[in-house]
Amino acid sequence: MNAAAPSKVYQLPQPLPLDSGQALEGAQVAYEAYGELAADRSNVVLVCHALTGDQYVASTHPITGKPGWWDRMVGPGKPIDTNRFHVICANVIGSCMGSTGPASEALDGKPFAMRFPVITVRDMVRGTVALLDGLGIERVHTVVGGSMGGMQALSLAANWPDRAERVLVIASTARHSAQNIAFHEVGRQAIMADPAWADGDYYARGTRPDNGLAVARMAAHITYLSEEGLTEKFGRRLQDREAKSFGFDADFQVESYLRYQGSGFTRRFDANSYLYITRAMDYFDLAEEHGGRLANAFEGSEARFCLVSFDSDWLYPTAESRHIVHALNAAGAKVSFVELSAPHGHDSFLLEHEQLDRVVKGFLE
Amino acid sequence: MSPSKSKLRPDLAAIAAHVAPGSRVLDIGCGDGALMAELQARSQVDARGMELDLEMVERCVARGLSVVQGDANTDLADYPDKAFDYAILSQTLQTATRPDLMLDELLRVGRRAFVSFPNFAHWRTRAALMFGGRMPVTRALPVTWYETQNIHHVTVEDFRELARAKGANIERAWFFANEKEISAPAANWRAEFAVFQLSR
């Protein structure tokens, strides 16, 4: 994987302080922006990306050549209307698409690799807030994100309560459950068990832990889908054959689909970034950061919140969103909540969904 | 956000007229948010809603209202005591699994409560049952018995009795027939709808 040149990079003028107590020197944040910034800077929508997402929310991905990951949501006349809003999407710290991460050069000119400090979701948001500072944007109209993007939106609302007027959290959670952590651990162990991982120091070598990263992606990908969705899409149908091979080729369509997802992922994502970002998500517990009571996180918040869950999402099920809604209610914050019906599990927030479009559009207006 | 142009339902208009400006309101079973929109626009009320029907919730969100999709039978428990100045239950009591328990919850989360419901003792309902011998389908109760969401039919007198049993003070009451307010005497016969203001 070659780090693609992002269209915009912000060099942080100061070291970025981290939850671990360390600081990241000379960090940079890569971002994309769409639509015109209003003269009074009142029309900024900050979009936060998910685990393996990036800043190319509505523009062609430089490595895959595919449309942006939320191209259907962000654009002229779309629910997040770039005719009206100035949309900013930053690549999180720790990632591999231009923001400083384990693949970046440390001060000694060599890649950080596992010397990169362990980061948290709050650290990612710190990086994004530093970017907003650099752009002279004190307050965003709306911060919106799905999955890990939703965690960032919640973290921003809790830790920088004056920075967002509206907070839209889709298919997300205020803390990682034991099950969430368990799935991430499977992925991390797959990467670290790959001989090519070489204790994370693979950048100078010719080989990379692509097999481990692909397995991590395959395991995670299953958690993004629903049983119903998988059954509908693949059932037990065989791939390019009439009968079972009595071997370990990808006999079933679902197997070759996962293999395809896994190998495609290794072309655009750094294995060490996957380790660091999944760790950050596992550490995420917004209540713990605020004295053990989630409502404390939102005490005195003036922002308007909207939470959306999907009934088939078992990674971050509706109960997780309701938990946040209760806390917001207890804190007296303005909150809306809808559970949308969708067959495709957690990934539903990325897919065509007219009701989601209407909720997003309505909440922003 | 502009106040709704369409006229509010008479029971909602009576409630809206008696919510103090600047207060905090929970509208339970808020539908498309007509009352909340009116309250927010007219008297800077901080209104929150609860609604089960997804499409209604969606319309509320699109109107800029704060509405949580939820079931009033179970989800009121999530709200702290006296979190609101007013808890409003319009045309929903008769759909509750346990109207008595819901009234308790209403008086717990709100300092005051408004409850409106169709009066099953209205003369037209009585006549339909007495002379037709079948469950009435009237203007106030327009759906057949097997399709109706109203699982606990209640009368003005029944509600007064429930309020007494629950130790709730009936502070005010309004009665409506033909979309017009009528006087309290003989309301149990004459009212199609009733609205009660309660406290405890």
Image (cartoon, grey):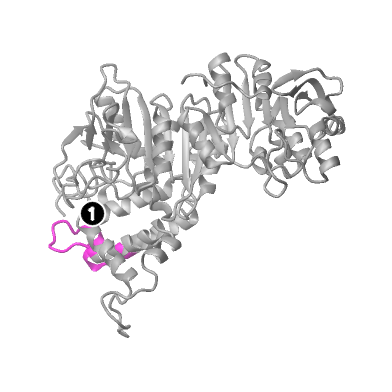
Chain of the residue where label 1 is placed in the rendered structure: A
Asked if the stretch drawn in magenta spans residue B100, the answer is: no
| In this picture, residue A296 sits left or right of residue A242 | right
Rendered view: A254 above or below A101? below
The residue wearing badge 1 is: A270
Dividing the picture into quarters, in which one does residue B179 lie? top right
Report whether B67 appears left or right of A131: right
* Image quadrant in which the C terminus of chain A is located: top left
Q: Quadrant of the N terminus of chain A?
A: bottom left
Report whether B100 appears left or right of A363: right
The image position of residue A192, as x and y in percent, is: 30, 63
Q: Which of B27 and A268 is in front in this view?
A: B27
Q: Where is residue B20 in the image (x, y as percent from the top left)?
A: 65, 15
How many residues crowd mark 1 within 10 Å: few (<14), some (14–19), many (20+)? many
Asked whether A207 falls inside the magenta stretch, the response is yes
Q: Where is residue A122 in the image (x, y as percent from the top left)?
A: 38, 38
State which region is magenta.
A190-210
Residue drawn at (33%, 34%), measured in percent from left and top? Answer: A80
